[in-house]
Amino acid sequence: MRQVSENPYTTLIDKIENPALRSMMAGILAENRQMRREITLLKAEGNRVIDMRPKLPDSRETVQILPASTGLFPSEVEALRHAISDRLLKQEGWMTDAEGRVKTEAGTPIYKPGYVTAIRKIVGECEATASSAAKRIGVAKGKFDVEEIE
């Protein structure tokens, strides 16, 4: 009866008569088995994501914060100022509320909250916070109106 060896390649290696060649072949087969085990292990662990992006320097001294209006032409800044001007709002029948929203006379919102305040910040009208403090919300005809305090 033939004895079963634990390694199927052992019988194959035993048939090689040259001891140097047999040793070299045994080394190659051992390396092959090791690589197969590593591949099986890597497959079992799933996909890995390797971040190859360069690391940013820890120093924050090089960060420069620019104003929002950087890169705008004077005509673009003027167009933004016109978009929130009292003259245009009155001409269109629009009004603003304390949250920076633009609404129609019927109370339908035209722009979301923050529209007017964002444009004021971009064009550099820092008195937006002072003017918002100078506004009050009044209730007229069941709607919210913003009125300037005189």
Image (cartoon, helix red, strand yellow):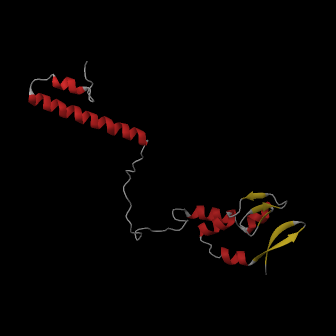
The image quarter containing residue 119 is bottom right
Taking depth in this image into account, of 77 and 149 the one nearest to the observer is 149
Count of number-bearing discs: 0
Taking depth in this image into account, of 11 and 110 the one nearest to the observer is 11
Q: Does residue 97 sit above or below 49 in this rendering?
A: below
Q: Does residue 102 sit above or below 19 in this rendering?
A: below
Q: Residue furthest right?
A: 141
Residue 28 pos. (x, y %): 20, 33
Q: Residue furthest bottom?
A: 150
The image quarter containing residue 59 is bottom left
Answer left or right for 145 relative to 62.
Answer: right
Q: Does residue 106 sit above or below 61 in this rendering?
A: above
Taking depth in this image into account, of 20 and 11 the one nearest to the observer is 11
The residue at 29%/37% (across/down) is: 35
The residue at 74%/70% (across/down) is: 98
Q: Residue furthest top?
A: 1
Answer left or right for 7 relative to 76.
Answer: left
Residue 46 pos. (x, y %): 44, 41
Answer left or right for 127 relative to 27.
Answer: right
The image quarter containing residue 122 is bottom right
